[in-house]
């Protein structure tokens, strides 16, 4: 139960992972690293970032794609410089996974703070 006066905000809609040059398959080390934290990505496939996906997104997070990243006017962009997990083993993928988790948690916190109604000071009784 939410406290009286608390703003109602639906949970963020899940968005697909997409890229400017997606691989054909998911890195097996990434599958293992995600499984270790209770997330099963075995049914996922890398996808090209499509216009409709970008258009319906509040924030587009890029991970070092440089000039290959498509630009969608009016969107908020975050470019996260991270090691590329491609071809790396699970020991190298774990810190990348953990860094992404921390950044996602911070982004979600920032987005929730940005959408909260601002407090309006009450005037003292006359």
Image (cartoon, helix red, strand yellow):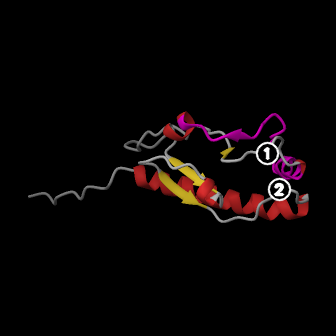
- The image shows residue 104, relative to residue 72, as above or below, that is below
Q: Would residue 72 be found to the left or right of residue 81 on screen?
A: left
**Residue located at (62% from left, 53% from top):** 68
Where is residue 94 drawn, in percent x and y?
83, 60
Q: First in sequence, mark 1 or 2: give its number.
A: 1
Q: Which of 75 and 98 is in front in this view?
A: 75
Q: Would residue 56 be found to the left or right of residue 68 on screen?
A: left
Q: Would residue 53 be found to the left or right of residue 39 on screen?
A: left
**Crowdedness of circle 2 by 10 Å Cα count: few (<14), some, many (20+)?**
few
Work out which residue is located at the far front of the displayed protein and give it.
67
- Tell me, for residue 1, which label it has, or none: none
- Tell me, for residue 86, which label it has, or none: 2
- Residue 53 falls in which quadrant of the image? top right
Which span of residues is magenta-colored? 29-51
**Residue located at (45% from left, 55% from top):** 113
- Residue 120 falls in which quadrant of the image? bottom left
- Tell me, for residue 23, which label it has, or none: 1
Asked if the magenta segment contains residue 71, the reply would be no
Mark 1 and 2 residues: CB-CB less than 8 Å, in contact? yes
């Amino acid at each position: 139960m939410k406290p009286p006066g608390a703003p109602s905000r639906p949970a963020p809609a899940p968005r697909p992972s997409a890229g400017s040059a997606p691989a054909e398959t998911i890195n097996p080390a990434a599958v293992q690293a995600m499984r270790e934290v209770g997330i099963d990505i075995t049914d996922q496939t890398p996808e090209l970032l499509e216009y409709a996906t970008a258009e319906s997104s509040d924030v587009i997070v890029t991970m070092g794609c440089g000039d290959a990243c498509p630009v969608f006017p009016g969107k908020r962009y975050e470019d996260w410089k991270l090691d590329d997990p491609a071809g790396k083993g699970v020991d190298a993928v774990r810190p990348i996974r953990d860094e992404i988790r921390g950044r996602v948690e911070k982004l979600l916190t920032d987005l929730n703070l940005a959408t909260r109604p601002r407090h309006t000071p009450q005037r003292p009784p006359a």
